[in-house]
Image (cartoon, helix red, strand yellow):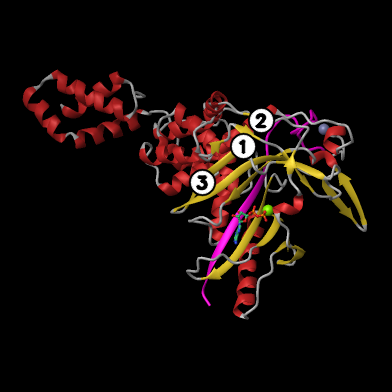
Amino acid sequence: MVYDVVIGLEVHAELKTQTKCFCSCKNEYSKVPNSNCCPVCVGLPGALPILNKYAVEQTIKAGLALGFEINNTAIFERKNYFYPDLAKAYQISQLEKPICINGHLRVGEKDIPINRIHLEEDAGKLIHEGNQTFIDYNRGGVPLIELVTDALKEPHIETADEAIEFLTKLRQIYIYAGVSDCELEKGQMRADVNISLKPKGSKEFGTKVEMKNIMGFKSIHKAIEYEIARQKEILDDGGEVEQETRKWDFEKGESYTLRTKENAEDYRYFPDPDLLAVKISNEDIERIKSTLPIMPGELKEKYVNEYNLSENDADIILAEKEITDLYNECVKLYFQPKTVANWFITEILARIKGGAKLDISKENIVWLIKAVDERKIQRNSAKDLLSFVWGTNLSAEEEAKKQGLLADLSDDFVVEVLNKVLEEKAQVVEQYKREQDPKILNFLVGQVMKETRGKASAQLVMEKLKEKIE
Ligand code: ADP
Ligand code: MG
Ligand code: ZN
């Protein structure tokens, strides 16, 4: 049978804030377990939450970066369940009135509709060692945004590749907007994947299976392909897919049942009586909008249309914000966007791919590119110098001088340039021979000065020119 695949994503990202979502504990990684905790974030009886305003602003910012509508009133609700990493047996989350609704993100030719982004608190971490389990509540109460795509609307995500493109773009936008660092190894961005299959063209949706908290894009890709194949086999055999939550086993490369049937009703959501409704004014929204930097999509347009970079080169420069920022700084200092892009791709990114950490100043980069353009230095020497000053505080210019790499404009070089000019301007030379107009000589000297970017001595050029012509 041929099936339509329907994929819905729920993506969690830890917000970048100074403090946690409902208390003043630090929102930062600590090696010492339970060192960033207080009665609120471990849920002691009687402790009251106080909302972190900045976490709300960061959520609004994430929404605006993705074109969401922002609700003027948002409500926090309790999602009730017990698990050892959640000591108070409920998570503060949002259900009916999240902060952001109705967004979208472009994947290939598809504008994928997104239902919502809501703000909630993260849970602690269980650490399993041998047959003992420890709990670290440092992550408990860290502000988390959850984004949910709308798989039941058209167009939706249909393949593992599209899911990964969605996540890659989303991550880039969050990083650009400064709302989350989205470091995947640290679990700062995690996705649940919902998948169902239905007979091709059927209007009715199939039963969905959810795979929770898969870490890393490669695993997500694998888990999706695995699940599509698993459901296809069940349906082909005339069986029924059971609604369940499955866990992806990273090492075995397969998934297993975690629990069956779980719906929103099971969590007995209700508005948290300890927290007031959040009022978000249109002025707040406008103010936050004005703090958004230009997003990668807009930058790409600028690179392609104004800077004449190819789409592919633009994508390469835009892949990591650290690189994009440095590129923009360099172009500001030396407005040769194509040349600078070439250097970034062939020299700088190549070094980073080889394992180097980005550690070079914009001044050094620009000096090297310019020196090659102005023929002050050989391209190969410039590459060597780039390696030499990388990761140091040395100045490329000083080093070029010290190492004797600067080309000096020898008389021979000037004559070489002069000969070239005379050859190219043979007609002008003929004209001078007829008219003997000194303005024509000045013009030719000017051409040589232009070619040597003013580095030659005009007197010397005039001398040699007269010699040649007469
Ligand atoms: P739950 O309450 O189980 O978390 P939601 O309704 O919140 O379920 O949906 C979670 C995600 O699953 C959303 O992205 C949603 O669009 C998607 N989804 C819902 N139904 C299906 C389905 N039949 N097939 C695939 N994805 C689905
Ligand atoms: Mg869910
Ligand atoms: Zn706390």
Quick one: 287 or 269, which is closer to the camera?
269
Q: Position of residue 359 (x, y in %)?
A: 62, 35
Quick check: is the Cβ at mark 3 less than 8 Å away from ligand 1? no
Name the kind of residue labelled 3 in the image: His
Q: Whole-Å distance between the Cαs marked 3 and 2?
A: 24 Å
Name the kind of residue labelled 1 in the image: Ile
Q: Secondary structure at mark 1?
A: loop
Q: Against 66, is 428 above or below?
A: above
**Foreground disc of the pair 3, 2:** 2
Quick one: 310 or 120, which is closer to the camera?
120
The answer to whether 195 appears left or right of 35 in the picture is: left
Find the magenta span and give its range.
1-30
Q: Main secondary structure of the magenta part?
A: loop
The answer to whether 287 appears left or right of 92 in the picture is: left
Residue name at image x 76 percent, y 50 percent: 267
Query: In this view of the protein, can residue 42 be seen by the observer?
Result: yes
Question: What residue did someone put label 3 on?
Answer: 104
Query: In this view of the protein, can residue 38 be seen by the observer?
Result: no
